[in-house]
Image: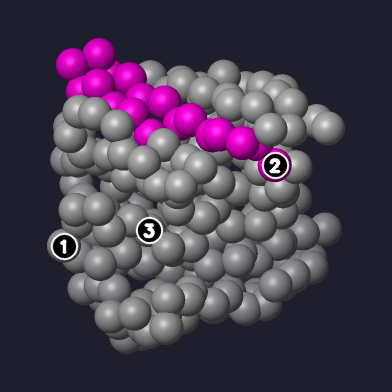
Amino acid sequence: GQNIDQPTEMTATEGAIVQINCTYQTSGFNGLFWYQQHAGEAPTFLSYNVLDGLEEKGRFSSFLSRSKGYSYLLLKELQMKDSASYLCAVRGMDFNKFYFGSGTKLNVKP
Amino acid sequence: DTEVTQTPKHLVMGMTNKKSLKCEQHMGHRAMYWYKQKAKKPPELMFVYSYEKLSINESVPSRFSPECPNSSLLNLHLHALQPEDSALYLCASSPPSGGQETQYFGPGTRLLVL
């Protein structure tokens, strides 16, 4: 079966840095995606990793280690609007199939 | 146009009703998806259409019936639903080439079954 694990909830302070981890065990791997989802809204794409290493996009960075089945999303200079759920998703052997983790709810406090 | 649209935004239906959810995209994507999402849970894949053919059905009950009339449209027909089917129904699309192209999600239809 497919298994993707993330912490359920995290709290951080405005202006700080937070790292959200994701570990996965899937049959096949064709990329790992991070999405942001505000309550009651659709997920929006944040980042993509398929090779080992760090991808940086503004305040957001994502890291992948395929040998360890591990990724993290790093959010810098946290803002109140970053309070949301963050979903880790792995695309399997079938390019059309994405396996989602349960999501990490991030609370940013003043 | 990088948008996936869904109608209606909200739907309330009784267990004997028949209704349909609609999804549309004009990005030339050839894969389209239906997901179901309960509160505080991740999206659960229901169906995938690839080049207008049903390629994945995740053992969804027959009271949900998908339809892909053309490459831009995706419908989900609902009949004799149960209260536990109340959820956010998300449509998504993606290009066929894979790579870093991700899925693009619509805003969802919030369904309440009474």
For label 3, the SS is loop
Rendered view: B3 above or below A7: below
Q: Which quadrant of the structure image shows residue A31? A: top left
Which element carries disc 1, helix, strand or loop? Answer: loop
Q: Which mark is residue A79?
A: 2
Write the residue at 51% across / 42% down. Answer: A59
**Percent from the top left, x then y, of residue B15?**
74, 62
Which quarter of the figure has residue B2?
bottom left
Q: Residues within 10 Å of mark 1 (few under 14, many from 20)?
A: few
Q: Is residue A103 left or right of residue B59?
A: right
- Pointer 3 with pointer 1, Cβ within 8 A: no
- Mark closer to the chain start, 3 or 1: 1
Q: Amino acid at mark 2?
A: Gln
Where residue B36 appears, as percent x and y from the top left, is 55, 51
Mark in the foreground, 2 or 3 = 2
Q: Are marks 2 and 1 on the same chain?
A: no
Q: Residue at x 43, y 69 (%)?
A: B66
Question: Which residue, given by chain and number where applicable, does mark 1 sit on?
Answer: B97
- Give the left or right position of residue B19, taking residue B69 as reference: right
Camera-side residue: B33 or A10?
A10
Magenta residue span: A62-79
In the rendered image, which residue does mark 3 sit on? B103
Chain letter for mark 3: B
What is the count of numbered marks?
3
Q: Chain of mark 1?
A: B
The alpha-carbon separation of the residues under discs 2 and 1 comes to 35 Å
Percent position of residue A10, x then y: 67, 22
Does the magenta segment cover residue A35? Answer: no
What is the spatial separation of the Cα atoms under label 3 and label 1, in whole angstroms? 12 Å
Q: Residue at x 70, y 42 (%)?
A: A79
Q: Secondary structure at mark 2?
A: loop
